[in-house]
Image (cartoon, helix red, strand yellow):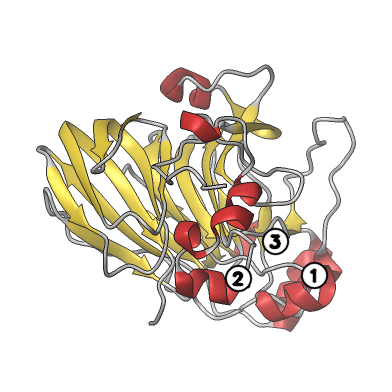
């Protein structure tokens, strides 16, 4: 039986309650749920949290099923050869009403050995930040394991953390091993490897949503922490109506499109699916066969088999993300 032709895919968001979450995902994006919602998983292949299609003939079908049916047509040949039927990236919007835990993530090698998982390389794009909002990224002085462990023992870890003030439009690349935390009053988009492995090293001495103190992972973290100063903040020029590269790693390449008018995008040289996250405004993404509207807070997956899209808008900001075939 002939399969339906692939088209740009939208997915139902999966809203995750967090002790540090708030109401901004509901207020700004219309993603409504009870409780303090910290994360909206926009596009996920994580077992137990696989995204389901919300538009077109595939409505209600899980992402994993479409990958099994379409393989490289959906993912791209190089992506499918590298990752098989596993979707390699996870896309989120995050609302931090309070500080997140101070944490870090293992790389592929450690995550595979300990958790049978991908590691977690990630990046952040700031959508909104209250006055004096900040991120924690790395340490505020030269650091080594001995000094770090002494502060851990003395419960003075907050004294050695590097704090960065942030504003709308800032972007950060968080490599595995980097100690980090999202601060209160920050709303951001997160792009990361498909992994839910986190080593929490400090949680502000607060209980979780169940009233119990959340588990810390200080022993696991010791040989994973990168004590070198991270080069995390991304510096990209602001250019209107062009695709501007924010960062490219082995796992994802992310560009920002600040649009005041309609543009066309030739995706034929990209051997990967392309994901658009709309962070501001509204746009219509059209192919030769279909058209899909995306507004602030929406995420759209363009299958690898689609080579050209037109983005029609009078004002929108989009993140454009794909898996690079080579670096």
Q: Are marks 1 and 3 in contact (CB under 8 Å)?
A: no
Residue 141 screen position, x and y as percent = 53, 74
Residue 181 screen position, x and y as percent = 59, 53
State the CA–CA distance, disc 1 to disc 3: 30 Å
Q: Identify the element where label 3 is drawn.
A: helix
Q: Nearer the viewer, mark 1 or mark 2?
A: 2
- Examine the rendering and report whether any part of residue 230 can be seen: no
Location of mark 1 (residue) = 116
Density class for disc 3 (Cα within 10 Å; few <14, some 14-19, many ≥20) is some
Q: Nearer the viewer, residue 88 or 288?
A: 288
Location of mark 3 (residue) = 157
Location of mark 2 (residue) = 83
Residue 137 located left or right of residue 47: left
Mark 2 or mark 1, which is nearer the start of the sequence? Answer: 2
Q: Nearer the viewer, residue 311 or 29?
A: 311
Mark 3 or mark 1, which is nearer the start of the sequence? Answer: 1
Q: Which residue is depicted at the point 82% across and 36% down?
A: 207
Residue 32 located left or right of residue 203: left
Q: Identify the element where label 2 is drawn.
A: helix
Q: Quadrant of the C terminus?
A: bottom left
Picture quadrant where residue 130 is located: top left
């Amino acid at each position: 039986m002939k399969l339906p032709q692939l088209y740009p895919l939208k997915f139902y968001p999966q809203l995750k309650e967090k002790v540090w979450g708030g109401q901004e995902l509901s207020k700004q994006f219309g993603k409504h749920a009870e409780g303090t919602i910290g994360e909206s998983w926009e596009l996920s292949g994580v077992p137990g949290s696989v995204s389901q299609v919300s538009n077109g003939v595939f409505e209600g079908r899980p992402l994993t099923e479409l990958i099994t049916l379409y393989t490289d047509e959906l993912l791209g040949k190089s992506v499918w050869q590298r990752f098989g039927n596993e979707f390699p990236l996870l896309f989120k919007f995050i609302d931090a009403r309070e500080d997140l835990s101070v944490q870090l993530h293992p790389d592929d090698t450690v995550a595979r050995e300990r958790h049978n998982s991908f590691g977690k390389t990630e990046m952040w794009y700031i959508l909104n930040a209250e006055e004096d909002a900040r991120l924690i990224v790395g340490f505020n002085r030269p650091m080594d394991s001995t000094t770090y462990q002494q502060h851990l023992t003395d419960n003075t870890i907050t004294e050695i953390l590097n704090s960065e003030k942030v504003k709308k439009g800032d972007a950060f690349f968080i490599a595995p091993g980097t100690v980090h935390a999202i601060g209160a009053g920050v709303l951001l988009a997160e792009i990361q490897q498909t992994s839910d492995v986190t080593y929490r090293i400090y949680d502000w001495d607060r209980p979780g949503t169940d009233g119990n103190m959340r588990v810390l992972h200080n022993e696991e973290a010791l040989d994973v922490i990168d004590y070198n100063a991270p080069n995390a903040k991304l510096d990209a020029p602001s250019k209107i109506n062009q695709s501007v590269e924010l960062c490219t790693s082995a796992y994802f390449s992310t560009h920002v499109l600040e649009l005041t008018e309609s543009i066309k995008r030739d995706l034929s040289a990209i051997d990967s699916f392309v994901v658009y996250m709309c962070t501001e405004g509204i746009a219509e993404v059209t192919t030769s066969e279909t058209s899909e509207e995306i507004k602030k807070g929406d995420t759209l997956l363009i299958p690898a088999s689609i080579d050209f899209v037109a983005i029609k808008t009078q004002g929108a900001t989009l993140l454009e993300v794909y898996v690079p075939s080579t670096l």
